[in-house]
Image (cartoon, helix red, strand yellow):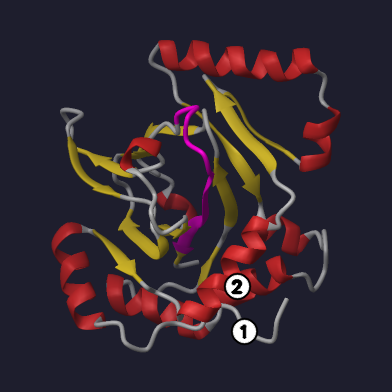
């Protein structure tokens, strides 16, 4: 790590315009949310992460396999997970699979105390970042956030759901994308929103240094990343909560 701090909010953001957009749509993408230097630092941390895998298929899960566990898994066990995911998506079941580093769990359980991942967790919950989210969303009672690092690589996806865990204090979901600048639409990994008929009503391209915020519940997914995508979609995701 260099001497550049993490998570310096871009002072040039037009917060009033962003708040109006969120009030209208219940969602917004904030581009260039961090200063350029600090965003580059966050991406370096994600690029150097030892990724595990999160997955669920038709009620089997959710599972979080740490990186070491994945390396030790037998080929037939990995194949069995793939088969469960395939079967779920061929039917009507909920499923997902993506690279994962659970920032909150790692912080609480001291996986690597004082590491840059811990600093990211602290900055997400620090007042400058919380104030930005409160001001843009209008949810003045937000007090904390959870977080996980995510990496969508070829064959990864998150099927449609609505984050209806409002009883757990979730109010605003977020995705802080750290993808490469010239991410092609054909590489998937889009955050998409749907109406009750299953039509796409909005979609956000993975962009470097772009923060997606949306009130929950809303129907959404992360689209399938095809095998020909040459790079992964780095992001930090989670929920801002009011308790």
Rendered view: 68 above or below 105 = above
Is residue 61 found left or right of 73 in the rendered image?
A: left
Q: Nearer the viewer, residue 134 or 223?
A: 223
Instruction: Find the magenta span and give its range.
Output: 226-240
Which residue matches tag 1? Answer: 5
Label 2 SS: helix
- Quarter of the rendering containing residue 108: bottom right
Which circle's residue, 2 or 1, is located before the other in the chain?
Answer: 1
Is residue 154 found left or right of 142 in the rendered image?
A: right
Where is residue 211 shown, x and y percent of the image? 39, 64
Where is residue 149 shown, x and y percent of the image? 60, 54
Label 1 SS: loop
Label 2 close to label 1 by CB (< 8 Å): yes
- Quarter of the rendering containing residue 148: bottom right
Report the residue at 53% width, 32% height from top. 154
Where is residue 105 shown, x and y percent of the image? 71, 55
| Any part of residue 125 in sight | no
Report the residue at 40% width, 11% height from top. 91
Which residue matches tag 2? Answer: 41
Where is residue 212 shown, x and y percent of the image? 35, 60
Rendered view: 25 above or below 89 = below
Quadrant occupied by the N terminus: bottom right
Is residue 225 found left or right of 111 in the rendered image?
A: left
| Any part of residue 36 in sight | yes
Local crowd at mark 1 within 10 Å, few (<14), some, or many (≥20)?
some
Rendered view: 132 above or below 99 = below
Q: CA distance from mark 2 to mark 1?
A: 8 Å
**Residue 31 colored in magenta in the image:** no
């Amino acid at each position: 790590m260099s001497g550049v701090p993490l998570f310096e909010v871009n002072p040039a953001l037009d917060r009033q315009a962003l708040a109006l957009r969120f009030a209208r749509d219940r969602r917004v993408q904030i581009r260039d949310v961090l200063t350029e230097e600090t965003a580059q630092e966050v991406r370096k941390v994600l690029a150097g992460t030892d990724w595990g895998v999160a997955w669920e298929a038709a009620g089997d899960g959710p599972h979080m396999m740490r990186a070491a566990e994945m390396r030790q898994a037998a080929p037939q066990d990995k194949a069995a997970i793939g088969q469960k995911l395939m079967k779920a998506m061929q039917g009507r079941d909920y499923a997902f699979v993506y690279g994962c580093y659970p920032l909150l769990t790692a912080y609480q359980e001291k996986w690597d105390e004082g590491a840059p991942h811990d600093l990211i967790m602290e900055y997400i919950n620090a007042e400058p970042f919380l104030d930005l989210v409160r001001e843009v969303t209008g949810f003045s009672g937000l007090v904390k956030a959870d977080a996980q690092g995510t990496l969508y690589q070829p064959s990864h996806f998150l099927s449609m759901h609505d984050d209806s865990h409002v009883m757990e204090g979730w109010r605003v979901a977020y995705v802080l994308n750290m993808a490469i600048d010239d991410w092609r639409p054909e590489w998937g990994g889009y955050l998409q929103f749907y109406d009750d008929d299953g039509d796409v009503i909005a979609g956000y391209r993975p962009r470097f240094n772009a923060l997606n915020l949306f009130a929950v519940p809303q129907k959404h997914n992360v689209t399938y990343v095809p095998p020909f995508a040459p790079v992964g979609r780095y992001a930090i995701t989670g929920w801002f909560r009011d308790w």
